[in-house]
Image (cartoon, rainbow, N blue to C red):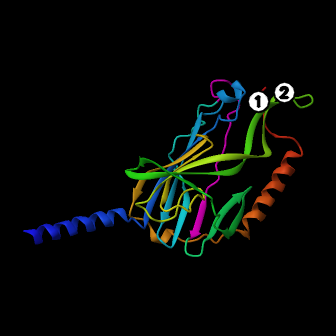
Amino acid sequence: MKIILFVSALIIASCASSVAQMKEGKIVYERVVNMRRNITDPEMRARIPETRTDKFELLFNEQSCLFKSVIEEDAPDPFASSGGDRGGQRMVFRMPSTTTFTDLTNQMQYEARSFFEKDFLVIDSVRQIKWKISEETKVIAKHLCKKATTTTVGQMMRMNFGGPPPGGPRRDSVRADNKPKEIEVVVWYAEDIPVAVGPENFSGLPGAILEVNSDNGASITAAVEISGKYSKKELVKPTKGEIMTRQQFTDNMKKIMEEMQKNGPVRFGRPD
């Protein structure tokens, strides 16, 4: 009888261990962005939705991972009713697709980026993030997670009403502030998925990151589905685009934005 109990205990322990050590699979995330966070004008706020939701997938194993956008053709348009009953021009924002492959073994990252219909392939080492780990816990997608925090620097995007151009009607304007802003990032990671992966270039913890909360709710990316199955043929690094480092890409984007703003902010006309 003791032998039977001992064998049963070993089987249970083995099953528990296999469940606790999920080292490959797929995590589906939803990112909710607060679109009105930095908009103070009431008319402008009324013309855009409060939030925007996008979906992503993270495919991973112990050697590599791939974080990519999920394009849903039948997804509802969050801007469908914006300004429709106000006679104004609808504000349209297209979020760029994301494809980031990380070689975990060699700590290298390959990121496919598009800007103004031009493709770039950003190749650089994985960013080393300084995390402050807490013992605070919560459950996300049925996984017990621990809390960690860090800070990062982001760029502000502001929307303002600009004055009317000479001889023309009043128009709305959009401009990007070049002033950096320090942002607090709170993440939750699952130690029972012991692979240092996560969404949006966040990684480096003793477990997969299942939630990222940037700037106190301005953007929240959270896991909604986790599976041990994934498409191995999709877990490959991108090869298309002009090759450059992360700093070179940042410098190029800064120059483009500065050139665009020399003629004033991007404007959205109202019908007369």
What is the spatial separation of the Cα atoms under label 1 and label 2, in whole angstroms? 8 Å
Measuring from the top left, give residue 22's x and y in whole percent: 39, 64
| x 60%, y 59%: residue | 201
Question: Is residue 113 located in the magenta-colored stretch of the structure?
Answer: no
Measuring from the top left, give residue 23's x and y in whole percent: 42, 67
Mark 2 lies on a secondary structure that is loop
Principal SS element in the magenta part? Answer: loop
Q: Which residues are magenta?
A: 83-103
Q: Amino acid at mark 2?
A: Pro
Pointers 1 and 2 in contact (C-beta within 8 Å): yes
Question: Is residue 98 located in the magenta-colored stretch of the structure?
Answer: yes
Residue named by callout 1: 270
Q: Nearer the viewer, residue 155 or 21?
A: 21
First in sequence: mark 1 vs mark 2: 2
Q: Nearer the viewer, residue 243 or 61?
A: 61
Residue named by callout 2: 169
Q: Nearer the viewer, residue 266 or 122?
A: 122
